[in-house]
Image: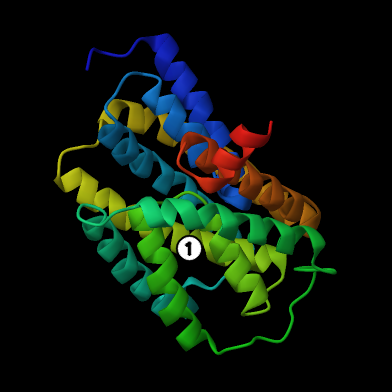
Amino acid sequence: MEIMSAEVLGILFLAGLASGFVDSIAGGGGLISVPALLATGMPPVSALATNKAQAMFGSFTATYTYARGGHVNIFEMKLGIIFTIIGAIAGTLLVQVLDANLMMAVIPFMLIAAALYFAFGPSLGGVDRHHLIERGPFYAIFGLLIGFYDGFFCPGTGSFWALAFVSVLGFNMIKATAHTKVVNFTSNFTSFLFFAVAGHVLWLPAAVMALGQLLGARIGANTAIKHGASVIRPLLVVVSLVITAKLIFDDPENIIHQWVLNNF
């Protein structure tokens, strides 16, 4: 690629800032950062790799902010980190050989269900509730599944983790978001290592966006801590629906896309 101008790098910084803010609260920051990277003309694989490189700074900053505020104990998440690493490695490797069409067809429905759950669950996530299973089996199941998904496909990972923490472990919204950032960082860093070794990361735009991520994630995490479920819940709903719409209308073969075309 040609050397990027100062104007382009400035736009990438702002994209990183906005992405870090949204991602630290509800996930889905890639909806901002990936299109910004693709708009520079870089190849898709390089855009995805560079996105992972810059995103891990945001997820790390958010993790640190939540941990410092006492909302997550990283050492108690050892199993979650281990199983998420295993899942992310499997997803990153298998995406090279598996057909993603089935996942493309199913994920929008899962995200719609998550949005409805967050939107209409009575006092959902306001306070801790009784857990359905113990943390060990929870991290084994969801660490492998969502870690695999993040390495394989990625959009909506934060929403799925938040949904799992709230609905299965009974966490309140701030606690669920804090724990989500830990496993988000884990899978981001794992995928980044594979992309970096393969030589796909473009370091200058990654560094510029990382600066924006650091600032945006710090502001977003502090906002979530201050306002709690009142800001996290609606943003989770909006992000889930936006990701759903993008997945549907980017895929002309999706059955919902076909239904809209045929009826409107």
- Residue 218: which quarter of the image? top right
Type of the residue with mark 1: Val
- Answer left or right for 21 relative to 136: right
- Residue 6: which quarter of the image? top left
Q: Residue at 24% across / 36% down in the picture?
A: 201
* Residue denoted by label 1: 182
Percent across and percent down for residue 72 are: 58, 70
The C terminus lies in quadrant: top right
State whether residue 64 appears in this view.
no
- Residue 88: which quarter of the image? bottom left
Percent across and percent down for residue 129 are: 74, 81
State whether residue 98 appears in this view.
yes
Percent across and percent down for residue 119 are: 78, 58
Q: In the displayed structure, would residue 202 be above or below residue 218?
A: above
Of residues 160 and 229, the one nearer the viewer is 160
The N terminus lies in quadrant: top left
Percent across and percent down for residue 251 are: 46, 38
Of residues 246 and 49, the one nearer the viewer is 246
Q: Residue at 70% across / 64% down in the picture?
A: 173
Q: Residue at 45% across / 29% down in the picture?
A: 35
Label 1: how many Cα within 10 Å (few below 14, some 14–19, many 20+):
many
- Answer left or right for 238 relative to 83: right
